Amino acid sequence: MAIQRLGGDDDPIISVVAERFCLPYAAELLVKKKVQAFSNAHYDVYDATGNILLQIDGGVWNLKRKRVMRDPAGLPVLTMREKAFTWRHQWLIHQGEGSDSKDLLCTVQTSHALQIKRRLDVFLAGNQTKDCDFHITGSLSSLSFKVHKGNSVLAEVLIQRIKKPLLFKNAKSLYLHCLHGP
């Protein structure tokens, strides 16, 4: 995954989950996907040297519609739950495996119920307005997406599909090139 932080050196890095997940430079990550069942998938995220950074479990086709992101030690970093019966496909992101309002980090939803071009709105936990804190544009089909704050691009992710991953044999993987600005 390539994320580029765009902006000047004086711009603060915005931490939504934790400072340890923020990098002030370009990072190349490898995402390995394993389908475990019809309704479940597992993702491993590695750095360029093959060290595991994150693990994501869960699926969207099961009744719980929940995914848990874990650190290399297996401790839960955050949990993503899709709210049932919403027009805008809303996800609640909680710290750890919590589901209490005190653990809420942000809410992510589609900008409009019917969209031609994909746009997701991100509302941080303290935001009580109708204006999103960030929005994300792009899609996996375009192999890139951007994270915006207002009219400024904060991050850009470029995705490359690779047939033979360098670190893994017999695995289908995505190579994500994260670009960070100056």
Image (cartoon, rainbow, N blue to C red):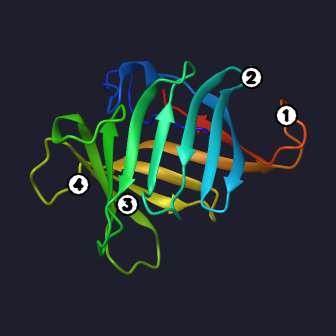
Which callout, 3 or 2, points at the residue further toward the start of the chain? 2
Horizontal side, residue 82 vs residue 161: left or right: left
- Asked whether the beta carbons under mark 4 and mark 1 sit within 8 Å of each other, the answer is no
What amino acid type should be assigned to the residue bearing mark 1?
Phe
Identity of the residue furthest to the left in this view: 128
Q: Secondary structure at mark 3?
A: strand
3D distance between C-alphas at marks 3 and 2: 31 Å
- Asked whether the beta carbons under mark 2 and mark 1 sit within 8 Å of each other, the answer is no
Horizontal side, residue 46 vs residue 116: left or right: right
Identify the mark at residue 120; answer none if there is no mark: 3
Mark toward the viewer: 1 or 3: 1
Residue drawn where x is 70% and y is 52% of the image: 35
Q: Secondary structure at mark 4?
A: loop
Number of numbered markers: 4
- Residue wearing tag 4: 132
Which of these two is toward me, 4 or 71? 71
Q: Percent position (x, y) of residue 147?
A: 42, 48
Identify the mark at residue 168; answer none if there is no mark: 1
Which callout, 4 or 1, points at the residue further toward the start of the chain? 4
3D distance between C-alphas at marks 4 and 1: 39 Å
- Residue wearing tag 2: 50
Q: Percent position (x, y) of residue 156?
A: 51, 45
Residue drawn where x is 59% and y is 36% of the image: 178
Quadrant assignment for the N terminus: top right
What amino acid type should be assigned to the residue bearing mark 3?
Leu
